[in-house]
Image (cartoon, rainbow, N blue to C red):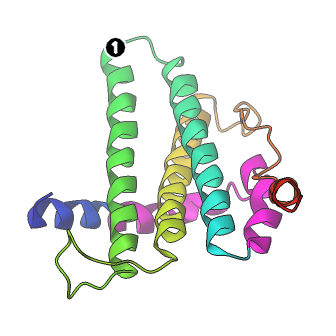
């Protein structure tokens, strides 16, 4: 990835982040954040944090993909659906850039990238950054869907029905 590409992606990330902060506040009551709240707060070591943030990121990515499918069903023309696909693809690129930026934040940038060491928090910070981008993309898609339905917030149904990372269950398995 060239320096120009990284700068462009970081700029896009910052634009998306600041432009959409208000939208995220409208959707604080969602099943994913509710399910993961306890696990995120209780993860105590690097392995647990990596596990919980990966599951959290996976949940938001799956929800983003579902929200895109649901929104595309509201449109007739392939060109409109293609814009939604492009939107999701762009957010995936931003998520990758945000994840890389977190790795840099936890790295010794005095070393060449191919031999650079990273701190133990790099993986969970990277996964968390991706999760936050996927969450924002999902909320934007839900807002677009509501716009198609006259702002009725009860029309979109989250597909997530899990219980978070179930950290207590994982701990019990490994303590035997």
Tell me which residue sits at (48%, 22%) in the image.
72
Front residue (pair 113, 72) = 113
Residue 32 is left or right of residue 137, and the answer is right
Based on the displayed image, in which of its 4 quarters is residue 28 positioned? bottom right
Question: Which region is colored magenta?
Answer: 14-43
In the rendered view, tell whether residue 162 sits above or below residue 126: above
Q: Main secondary structure of the magenta part?
A: helix
Residue 96 x, y percent position in the rendering: 36, 54
Residue 121 x, y percent position in the rendering: 52, 76
Tell me which residue sits at (49%, 66%) in the image.
123
Please tell me how many numbered marks the rendered image carries.
1
Q: Where's the N terminus, which quadrant?
A: bottom left
> Helix or strand or loop: what does disc 1 sit on?
helix
Front residue (pair 137, 38) = 38
Tell me which residue sits at (10%, 61%) in the image.
2
- Residue 29 counted in the magenta span: yes
In the rendered view, tell whether residue 146 sits above or below residue 42: above
Give the residue at mark 1.
Answer: 78
Outermost bottom residue? 110
Tell me which residue sits at (82%, 53%) in the image.
166
Q: Where's the C terminus, which quadrant?
A: bottom right
Based on the displayed image, in which of its 4 quarters is residue 19 positioned? bottom left
Outermost front residue? 176
Residue 10 is left or right of residue 34, and the answer is left
Front residue (pair 138, 56) = 56
Residue 75 x, y percent position in the rendering: 46, 17
- Residue 83 counted in the magenta span: no
Residue 176 is left or right of residue 48, and the answer is right
In the rendered view, tell whether residue 104 sits above or below residue 124: below
Residue 137 x, y percent position in the rendering: 49, 48
Neighbour class for label 1 at 10 Å: few (<14), some, many (≥20)?
few
Residue 119 is left or right of residue 79, and the answer is right
């Amino acid at each position: 990835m060239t320096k120009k590409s990284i700068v462009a992606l970081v700029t896009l990330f910052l634009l998306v982040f600041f432009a959409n902060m208000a939208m995220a506040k409208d959707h604080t009551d969602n099943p994913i954040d509710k399910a993961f709240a306890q696990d995120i707060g209780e993860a105590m070591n690097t392995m647990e944090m990596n596990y919980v943030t990966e599951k959290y990121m996976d949940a938001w990515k799956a929800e983003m993909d579902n929200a895109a499918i649901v929104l595309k069903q509201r449109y007739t023309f392939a060109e409109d659906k293609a814009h939604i696909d492009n939107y999701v693809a762009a957010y995936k690129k931003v998520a990758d850039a945000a994840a890389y930026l977190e790795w840099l934040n936890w790295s010794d940038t005095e070393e060449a990238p191919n031999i650079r060491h990273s701190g133990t928090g790099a993986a969970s910070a990277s996964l968390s950054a991706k999760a936050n981008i996927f969450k924002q993309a999902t909320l934007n898609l839900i807002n677009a869907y509501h716009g198609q339905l006259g702002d009725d917030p009860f029309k979109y149904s989250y597909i997530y029905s899990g219980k978070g990372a179930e950290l207590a269950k994982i701990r019990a398995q490994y303590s035997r």
